[in-house]
Image: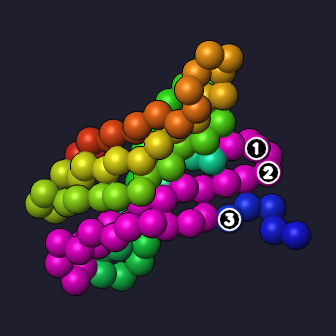
Amino acid sequence: MHKYFNEFFDVAVVKSYDVWAVGYAYTRNDLNFKTLIEHWNGTSWSIVPSPNQPGTIANELRCVVASGSTTLWSVGTFNSQVKGNPGLSTLTEHITQG
């Protein structure tokens, strides 16, 4: 069985050498879904650090919009599974690079 997996839900293309993908990463060690942002620079993909809501078990990004080559907006969901929490909540992230 795989120890981890990633899933992407959306891609934003600024130029052929400036592509962003968002989704989530899962590892059995963490037992959590964490936000995942990757960037294509025309040669290779790299993981871009992205925040997660503290105290949550699931964070995922579902949609991304790039406004220029250094600014991203992404939306998704997070789930804290805390008593009294309705479950899924909206997650909005603004990432700047460069």
Q: Amino acid at mark 2?
A: Arg
Q: Position of residue 3 (x, y in %)?
A: 80, 61
Instruction: Label 2, secondary structure: give it.
Output: loop
Can you tell which quarter of the image residue 81 is in?
A: top right
The amino acid type, in three-letter code, at marker 1 is Leu
Majority secondary structure of the magenta segment? strand
- Residue matched to label 1: 31
Residue 90 vertical placement versus 13 (above, below): above
Q: Magenta region: which residues?
A: 6-32
Q: Is residue 75 left or right of residue 85?
A: left
For residue 31, side relative to residue 21 (left or right): right
Residue designated by label 3? 5
Q: Amino acid at mark 3?
A: Phe
Side of 58 where 38 appears, left or right: left
Residues at marks 2 and 1 touching, judged by CB atoms closer than 8 Å = yes
C-alpha separation, residue under disc 1 versus residue under disc 3: 12 Å
How has the structure been colored for display? Answer: rainbow
The verdict on residue 9 being magenta is yes
Determine the secondary structure under disc 3. strand
